[in-house]
Image (tube, coloured by chain):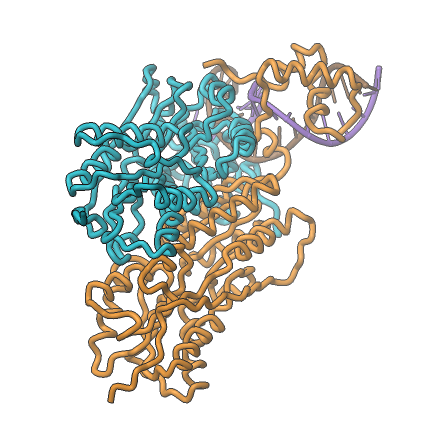
Chain colours: A cyan, B orange, C purple, D brown
Amino acid sequence: MQKQPTIRDVAQAAGVSVAVVSRVLNPGSGPVAAATRGRVNEVMKNLGYHPRTAARELKYGPPTTLGLLLADVSNPFFARLADRVVQEAHSRGIQVLLMTTQEDDQLESERLATLIERRVSGIIATPTGNNLATWKQLQDLGTEVVFVDRSIPSLPEVDVVSIDNFESARAATALLAAHGHRRIGIISGPASSTTGRDRIAGYRQALETAGLEPDELLIRHAAFRGPAGGDAASALLNIEEPPTALVVANTAQVTEVLRRLSHAGIDIPGRLSVIVFEDSPWTELMTPALTIVKQPIDLLARHSVQLALSNTQGKTSEKRNVIRVAAELVERSSVARLQLSK
Amino acid sequence: MQKQPTIRDVAQAAGVSVAVVSRVLNPGSGPVAAATRGRVNEVMKNLGYHPRTAARELKYGPPTTLGLLLADVSNPFFARLADRVVQEAHSRGIQVLLMTTQEDDQLESERLATLIERRVSGIIATPTGNNLATWKQLQDLGTEVVFVDRSIPSLPEVDVVSIDNFESARAATALLAAHGHRRIGIISGPASSTTGRDRIAGYRQALETAGLEPDELLIRHAAFRGPAGGDAASALLNIEEPPTALVVANTAQVTEVLRRLSHAGIDIPGRLSVIVFEDSPWTELMTPALTIVKQPIDLLARHSVQLALSNTQGKTSEKRNVIRVAAELVERSSVARLQLSK
DNA sequence: TTGTATGCGTTATCAC
DNA sequence: GTGATAACGCATACAA
């Protein structure tokens, strides 16, 4: 274990001053004789020299790191988002600090603190919904904050990138209605989440358009973590007049709900038509292949990174950005026309 | 956008010197009068002061960041690994820089360069298999390198954490043989990967034990990315004497293979028994529920983080660590007893 | 074209 | 208990 060479070691070995080495390191920052440059580069290679990021960051604020604060990377949706965000960031020479909140305010608060200490230039996050003061502080500090997938209503200044939740849920519900279903259930995220709310709103809209009376018993909220989704599914199936169709709009709970339906021996789509918000390759492999609402993760990632880096680019657009990308309804085999069995 | 207060601003506002503030910041580094401490804390809160990590790192080498260099986070296996690694690291106050290689040497090389520049204390990686010199350099620099899931044979000094690939494949194959199968196919990772090799070796061992003659036609390698897995599956089904059972040991290609089988209308397990290396919740939801080799991701993550941080803990164990954790064969419904239809 | 000196924000060493 | 001050590694005016 040798200790790291510094810019001074390089300078000495090359017989020049540190300033020259620095100029070689940052082309364009000043003139360097071609011969000198060659020699210095040579020495750097031999010594295995690498400039230390921490020292560089100390001089200028570092637009070189970005925080990605997600609820949970084991959720395939967030995993794919992380994957795309990382790729997108790397293509711009930006590094990504990955953090998770487990949907826990307290953890979120701690993560935000370290993000502040690191002076990241931007944060892409799925907020829990609390820590309002900290989010504000972050913005005041000049950190570009971008909420992705969800947002916080009481923080109307923060940029948001998400799918059009309202329209997605509306389209899914409308499809079911068009297949003759009149008892359509929906399992969505917590009522406190914007995502959950918007999807429910779209659902209601579709019902209205189809001339269907909303029934609060058919609307279930499930927490992002835990067995809530399964419980909601069971409850839904046990009401007096159970649904013949179901929209699972809480992405995080999709497998949990399906597991419960499977264990209950519910025939899909014979007894229950199903549409899920999910984009795992597995949805196509199931029997029947699931009709899904597919979120354009690439676009979410690209827009998020772009916004999170927008202060870096100098284009400090003063007004807030809200980007809603369209989700795609992919029809497969889990939706059937309602059999009138009266 | 206000600019960030520094330790000097705090000192001035509190009417003390920076040294005192520093002591308040790092308890135990020196005495501070209780009254003073209270006042300083107060001021810090009011000013919204946060010590800057970059400056701290400049003084000491930073055992505060860890690099996680994965092939691909959209692969659920790696995603869950990332999730656990991040949690594990956070619980120790360590941050994680997430990077992906897309199985590309060149990208890997670039990522390693930035990891060096950041002076991360440790790196957990799924190496592509090249960049040998850089991996060595990293170790010489005192960076703790841990390969997870795979390794590089020509780098015998690097710590490795993985499942027991040999035993896992052996057990899976043995289970199929025990069900009467005599034509057992296997699709594994590239022959260049240790993972792929070990699994094939375990497979061969099981055949031998069962008194079965290995047939090279039944052994297929598939690249981690792209349609290779599907092609391998198709090829396997079209040989003269096709297999009646299949082990899909290339985790990354599991869905691709299943998709192909599904499209080919292969009945599982009627015509083909299947065991896959995969631990997605979806495997249980399929019809039939898949018999799987379940990788103990929590353990992989925990051990990886521990090793990656071992230099920090002062216990610089000089000898190399190779940790192999047992994988679990979970029997479900995709394996059937061979029907003798002669 | 190159070298010198200074500062970035923090911690540690020493006096007071 | 507290306060100056010197590093840490790098980039950059400014001088040479």
Is residue A322 left or right of B55 when viewed as pictured?
left
Rendered image quadrant of residue B121? top right
Q: Position of residue B21 (x, y in %)?
A: 69, 20
Question: Taking B33 as reference, is A311 left or right?
Answer: left
Residue A36's quadrant in the figure? top left
The reply to whether residue A177 is visible in this rendering is yes
Residue at image point 58% right, 29% down = B55
Q: Say which quarter of the image contains residue B263.
A: bottom left
Q: How many marks are shown on the rendered structure?
A: 0
Percent position of residue A92, x then y:
34, 36
Residue B236 is situated, as x and y percent measured from the top left of the image, at 25, 74
Q: Residue at x 24, y 56 (%)?
A: A288
Asked if D14 appears above or below A193 in the picture, the reply is above
Q: Residue at x 73, y 20 (%)?
A: B20
Q: Front-most of A256 and A117?
A: A256
**For residue A141, above or below residue B154:** above
Q: Position of residue A201 (x, y in %)?
A: 29, 27
Nearest the viewer among A104 and A340 is A340
